[in-house]
Amino acid sequence: METFFTASDIESFRNIPTPFYYYNTGLLKRTLQAVTGEAARYNYHIHYAIKANANHKILKIIQTSGVGADCVSGGEIQAAIRAGFHTDKIVFAGVGKADWEINLGLDNNISCFNVESIPELEVINELATTKGKTARIALRINPEVDAHTHSHITTGMRENKFGINLDQLSAVLDKLQTLHSLKLIGAHFHIGSQITEPGPFILLCQKVSQINHDLEKRGITLDNINFGGGLGIDYETPDRRLIPDFKTYFESFHRHFPVKPGQQIHFEPGRSIVGQCGALISRVLYIKEGSFKKFVILDAGFTELIRPALYGAGHKIENLTSTETEDVYDVVGPICESSDCFGKDVRLPRTHRRDLIAIRSAGAYGEIMASQYNCRKLPQAILSS
Ligand code: LLP
């Protein structure tokens, strides 16, 4: 089994003020090789979902691998351009695009707007007309596939706010005929995140094949089919699979989705590219022995990593500096809220003040979701050399 931290990494952490994010750039590069290599077998195209981690240095490494960028805000488009992503490899999704964000996309000739409603189509058409431009668009269709993941990160069900419902697709296509500054180039789907079973993806392939077929009957052949992101990672035992199984993932799309001639297939992975490459490093402030529990109180809290508090997500917690016999602790942060807890009844080597604690698999939706609640400073990021 490969180790995520080297002994010299841990030695160097002793001199760095905590909390901070540590990124293993070697692992990131190998993950990028894996995802691009496996996608290339089938000529699939990758757009990294910037929302997972928009750290500038991380974006630069990702951009160098040749993938495109999936953005959900004007700020993300700006971050992508700053990191060197070519604008013809930038797609712009999101259920609520503001006028300035649409204008930014138009001014930069981004490759595609993923559109979620008729009012949005009308606004993009109007803004494109004003500029004398044609906007390339894909329709985000809600395929009504249950991703079997946490309810806060499932997106492909009829009741979710995302996408155009299947029963409204025909009306949307009729409307499109009247909007002359738009060019339909594709369909976009995303059913949810942290999906660890192949079932929902296979169902997605079946639904999209049907849609692809129905559209062809209407005389519409889509240049691009975009399956979104969603591939999950191993939070419980990260070292067992530091690089997600992209081979099986793409193979399953290849087996279950028949591509029409000339059609390009796109994916938007976020978590599976950056998730395992990052860890939140924190110091123990106190060991508090309550009447019922022992608490490890860290100097990191949900301000640095909100996933446990927001989704009840589990991240592996490791003591990097103790090898003593194990004890059982609740590992909590300093924020004045009971939900500021990284794990209950966690087995750790006996832990002391100033020990270094790593919270693993925090490369995705970690640093980028940090907040300044309690007037705390945003965490620094350290990249391995
Ligand atoms: N494409 C679209 C349209 C998306 O909405 C998302 C994620 C992705 C791609 C990337 O999905 P991924 O490959 O990372 O699963 N903050 C939550 C996750 C929210 C995901 C939102 N959309 C978490 O910490 O689990």
Image (cartoon, rainbow, N blue to C red):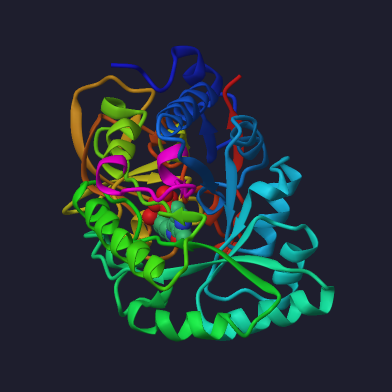
Q: Quadrant of residue 6?
A: top left
Does residue 262 belong to the magenta stretch?
yes
- Taking 104 as reference, is 250 above or below it? above
Does residue 3 belong to the magenta stretch?
no
Task: Write down the region rendered in magenta.
Answer: 254-273
- Taking 373 as reference, is 12 above or below it? above
Measured from the top left, where is residue 71 in percent x and y? 59, 57
View quadrant of ligand 1 = bottom left
Apparent side of residue 212 relative to residue 89 in the rendered image (left or right): left
The residue closer to the viewer here, 210 or 296, is 210
Q: Residue at x 62, y 43 (%)?
A: 55
Q: Quadrant of the N terminus?
A: top left
Total count of labels: 0
- Taking 75 as reference, is 59 above or below it? above
The residue closer to the viewer here, 321 or 78, is 78
Measured from the top left, where is residue 249 in percent x and y? 30, 39
The residue closer to the viewer here, 155 or 260, is 260
Measured from the top left, where is residue 278 in percent x and y? 47, 35
Q: Quadrant of residue 275?
A: top left
Q: Quadrant of the C terminus?
A: top right
Apparent side of residue 80 relative to residue 199 in the rendered image (left or right): right
The residue closer to the viewer here, 297 or 74, is 74
Q: Residue at x 50, y 56 (%)?
A: 303
What is the residue that sits farthest to the right in this orientation?
Answer: 131
Q: Residue at x 63, y 36 (%)?
A: 63
Can residue 288 be seen from the camera position used here?
no
What is the residue that sits farthest to the left in this orientation?
Answer: 292
Can residue 24 be seen from the camera position used here?
yes
Measured from the top left, where is residue 319 in percent x and y? 34, 29
